Amino acid sequence: FFQTPIQLIKITNAQAQIVEILNHLVTHNMVRVHEDAPLKFLELIQVLRAAHFEDLEMLWSQYRNRPAYRQWILDAIPVIGTPAALRFIKEKFLADELTVAETAQALIASVHMATANTENIKLIETLAVNSKVLENPVLREIVLLGYGTMISKYCAEKAVCPVELIKPIQELLAEAVAKDDTPEIILLLKVLGNAGHPSSLKPITKILPIHGTAAAILQMRVHADAIMALRNIAKKEPRMIQELALQLYMDKALHPELRMLACIVLFETRPPMGLVTTLANIVKTEENLQVASFTYSHMKSLTRSTAAIHASVAAACNVAVKILSPRLDRLSFRFSKAIHMDIYNSPLMLGAAASAFYINDAATILPRSIVAKTSAYLAGAAADVLEVGVRTEGLQEAILKNPAIIDSADRITKMKRVIKALSQWKSLPNRKPLASVYVKFFGQEIAFANIDKAFIDQAIALATAPSVQAFGRNTIKALLSGASYHFAKPLLATEVRRILPTAAGLPMELSLYTAAVAAAAVHIKATTTPTLPENFHIAHLLKTDMQLETEIRPSIAVNTFAVMGVNTAILQAALLSRAKLNSILPAKIAARLDINEGYFKIEALPVSVPEHIAAVHVETFAVARNIEDLAAEKITPLIPAKVLQSISREILTSKITSSASASLSRSSEIISKDMAATKPTIKFRAAQFEKKYCAKTVAIGMKGCIKVATENAAFLKDIALYKLAGKHSIALSFKPIESEAIERLE
């Protein structure tokens, strides 16, 4: 069963419609973003989803040599999420028609947007063993992580998930452990973590330091990644992960960082009251203040959670915190901390949360590990939207080998000592990474990087390559003669849908779509004194006085649609809330740089600005339409204009006018005629508001104003849902103060 997304246009000729929309997007988003560009981008995605592989081939052959069109195509095709899109990206990469950067970007988007089925899983599997992918470590990581994501999405729809899908990764992990190949072990652990298959628990457990010396000889960062790989498995088998995480936490012989990571995993399983109380009793006798501080702060922050999904954990943590000593609450930020904050609206079933985990060590200058993530709650579902983690173990060791760094000295001296320490680290044979970083999106790791000796050597080789130096010279020559650039970048930021069956047999959909288009027009002119020779070297820039004047006009348009109602391929009848953000912020900057003399100056010059540099408009209305006859589409405002005019008086007259009654009949959200007849003298408060706030800053000679206006249905019922209905707008503007004109800021 496939539930189609909301249809924006009727598809009659996919090829012709793709070309028409593409032409509109390219021509209307050069200097600044068109306000309807996000909607047009959504239309392009819809038509591309109906296109066949041959249609994509024809489109590519027609526009691949036209940079503006090429960029729009490569931004749109990955997010359509069809098997044709994945096949297109694979074949174009293998045919050397895509660069590595274009392929990486396209694969990340397409793997996470594509429907998880056996055809797509097989395609990713064959791509993972392709020789061209194996030769490029970055692409291999992206493809393997994407394979784990595909398995996770496929198994989410199955009562029993086939073990055969994840078996090849488990076998590769066993081989990597036998060879003691640390980078390969870490990569495969992350793949198993993305997949979240319960059968991976045993292979991961063998790597944890709880089964003797075989696992103990592995590096600690391997143990750390193995523990974090349990998090997605915990969503399916929380009881098993709780037992394992508690066992790791209770092992006081383990490194404190591993015990704190086990604590993170344990609380993500939403432990019951008994387990949280057990944890509190362990903390009472804990000798390591880093572990005690982290666990206590984690419990304390969860007690303040208002999200329905954390209700039982919050109650359990309330009891646990009372068991523990309040002195743990007074520990400074030298000790490890966990922070959780959330906001949740029960009537709307909407909420958001932010968490941060700060793992420190008494013997280190920098934190050993930092993890930050954001979550969202919608209609009873929860998702970890974005997560970023950083480990700095190797960096700490490199810095601590030079004790003079921590001595009291001026900032420049300390910076020189740090650079010296890092240069000494590079010459050492030790290959431990300086740092590592990873990024997760919706609970799936999409990329990670280890900054080690090999990474630094590759970066240096790339920066000093003849092709890069030639590119740098050509860029500088272009700037000296004056150059103009235009950039445009579309993004389908959100496509969340939840379909519910109804007694009437029609599908009820709750969905949220967010599309954005950003653009920038840039003009740069550079001059140097003395003039650079024809065949100059990059090092000559160090001996020149360079002046740079730049005018940039960045703009962005964002459209968000929240839909609730009946959705079929032909008929739609729904409540639609649309939010539109448009912003443009021009700037003109002049800079002067003389490295030889140590002179640097930057100036902000006057520039013409539009009436509003940012504006947001939100409107909610009912829509009913037949996709076969879009001209007959019916859009009904929830609060008709005549009702607002009538209700804006302080007190209604004893009888509602006939014109208002006619408007009332058009919306089910407005008071019925019977109610109006039985209670003709009810008094309502006006639900219209318009205000303008201004502030002056004489120092920069500018006046800023915010204009807020709203028309809502709060006169019916003073609750959040009725306040959201109607029209809302907010606009931000900046204008120079006439009597305080300023020529430039330095």
Image: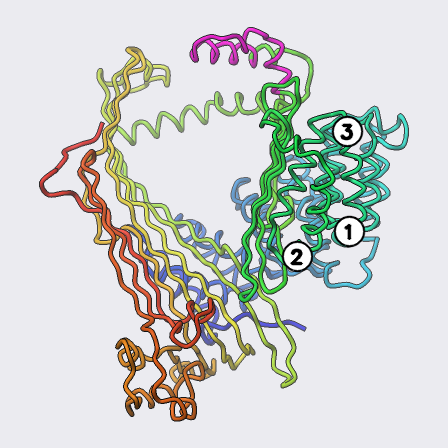
Q: Which residue is more in the foreground, 164 or 715? A: 715
- Return the residue at label 2: 309
- Return the residue at label 3: 286
Q: Name the disc covering residue 696, or none.
A: none
Q: Dot 2 lies on which element?
A: helix
Q: In the rendered structure, which segment of residues is drawn in magenta?
A: 395-422
Residue drawn 39% across the image and 80% down it:
636
For the residues labelled 1 and 2, the Cα–Cα distance comes to: 13 Å
- Return the residue at label 1: 272
- Magenta stretch encompasses residue 211: no
Residue drawn 75% across the image and 39% down it:
189
Which label lies toward us, 2 or 3?
A: 3
Mark 1 Cα-neighbour bin, 10 Å: few <14, some 14–19, many ≥20: some
Q: Position of residue 213 (x, y in %)?
A: 89, 25
Looking at the rendered structure, the kind of residue marked 1 is: Pro
Q: Dot 1 lies on which element?
A: loop
Q: Position of residue 38 (x, y in %)?
A: 41, 60
User: Which mark sits nearer the N-terminus, 2 or 3?
Assistant: 3
Q: Position of residue 652 (x, y in %)?
A: 29, 82
Residue 158 lies left or right of residue 47; in this view the side is right
- Magenta stretch encompasses residue 414: yes
